[in-house]
Image: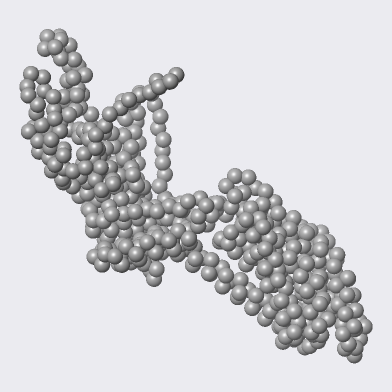
Amino acid sequence: MGRRNAAISTRMSYDMEEALKDIPLTVPGMDIVYLQDVANIYTTQDADGSIAHYNGSDTVSLSITKQQSSTAAALSKEVRQVIEDLTGEDASLEIHIVNDSADDIRSSLCSIAETIILAMALSMAVIWLFFGDLKASLIVGSSIPVSILSALICMKRMDFSLNMLTLAALSLGVGMMVDNSIVVLESCFRATEKFGEERGGLMDYFHDALEGTGIVSASVLGSTLTTCVVFLPLAFLSGMAGQIFKPFGFTIVFCMTASLISAITVVPMCYMLYKPVEKRAPLTTPLQKLQRAYGKALRAILPKKKTVMGVSVLLLAVSFWMAAQLNMSLLTSDDQGQLAITVEMVPGIKSSEADKLLRRVEAAFADYEELESYVTSYGGSGVSSGDSASIMVYLTEDRKIPTKEAKKIFEERLSALSDCSITVEESTISGTSETDGYELILKSTDYDELKSVSDQVVAELMERPELARVHSTLENSAPVVEVTVDAIQAKAAGVAPGTIGRACTRPSTEHRPWSWRWTGRILM
């Protein structure tokens, strides 16, 4: 075609089963033979290449993953709408949502939002206990929503989403937001006390607010900048930690900056308009006693400089030592009530045998009292692949036994099963799993030597009573049938070694040379 060569291919589509019967076959030295003369053609169900169980019953499992540009909440809403439409069209169809990550996300976000509201209420209550005036509490409390709204606007400009970390930063910021407002309000009260409380005009309170704010403006600015300097480096971490804590650090900086602006603008204005009066607070007497005791302690401690410095250095050293004893992890573990069970079976196992083995595994824990549901997946293109199966176990929400203890119970029940290697892990909200197992990697260029050493290690470890299960990956070596071809006899018979190999493979291997389009879908 012009200056280019084009490949030419011919094809024919067969839409009906009857059309397949009339396919002509060319046989040398014979008349035309049709496919129906040498083969039985019929429609049947394909052999199961995968296994899926839901609470022990056969099922079709689907795992739906959101796109990068979408959110879990939006995906959950659309999927639930599709399920509602499907079940409405067919009453016999049963669709169970086993796990929806959007539910956990919404629950966590609502919990943190409730914490923020509670923190606002408690902050105002504490301010009332110390100032004794409701107006003063409302003035300081008004800076909280203003600061949060300003922080949300900045988060929107930075394209941050409302997630657990950003909401946790807002919750942490609520406690620090009121610091600047309290300092400014206290300074305004002191200015009113200085110039005389008998004045009550608007301009009098205006001058008091201006005087009080000017006195502490440099202090609140320095305090806010110090806090921002502490949290701002979190926004510039590299790697996974940087991706996680960047919104966290910036959100706190936004909160503190907004609280500073609110403290030097909103608080003085509200002080001028609402004219709060400092009264005898409920905690005035206990606070005065505490101040007197603190003053006595300072007078006794300050002359002893060496003792104070020695105790301070000792406390610092003890703090570093205690910090070194803490466990380290990227995210804290939490009790999600989910267990991930991995079943490693021998390579090449048939689907029917794998199904029997998996049902034995399920029967070992199916009668657990706090079990809500479980899903088993094997084969196909799902989560499990090769000769391993995965079982996700979901415990009840009102469980009395922690998931970590339930994990040990499952391990004890599954330890008696043979012909497979079973691993039980605790799933966390971060998407990772926790396991108490240890892995030992052996490497060698000699397989026989590696197998011998591996068997010795397994034998020694199995004698330890503290170990529940010991498994070597060499135990899962696939069976191999080796056929040795006699070159002389093969040559005498006129048969090539490759032909013999294909003849031996054909009985155990399924070949699918045809694809058949059925109602718009291609069936292999």
Image position of 428 (left or right of 249): left
**In this rendering, would 215 be left or right of 288?**
right
The residue depicted at 42 percent of the width and 50 percent of the height is: 436
Q: Is residue 305 above or below residue 376?
A: below
Quadrant, the C terminus: top left
Between 457 and 69, which is closer to the camera in this rendering?
Answer: 69
Identify which residue, 325 or 109, lies in the foreground: 109
Specify the quadrant of the image occupied by residue 503.
top left
Quarter of the rendering containing residue 296: bottom right
Q: State the image coordinates of residue 243 (x, y, percent, origin top left).
A: 59, 50
Instruction: Residue lying at the far front in this picture: please name it.
Output: 2
- Left or right of 350? Residue 175 is right
**In the depicted view, which residue is nearer to us: 515 or 79?**
515
Residue 311 in the image: state x and y as whole percent. 74, 60
The residue that appears at 34% across and 31% down in the rendered structure is: 453
Which residue is located at x 23 percent, y 33 percent? 513
Query: Where in the figure is residue 241, as x and y percent of width and height?
Result: 59, 49
Instruction: Locate residue 262 relative to residue 214 in the image: left or right.
Output: left
Position in image of residue 413 (x %, y %): 28, 56
Above or below 263: residue 387 = above
Figure quadrant of the N terminus: top left
Residue found at x 64% / y 53%: 246
**Quarter of image, res 183:** bottom right
Residue 252 visible in rendering: no
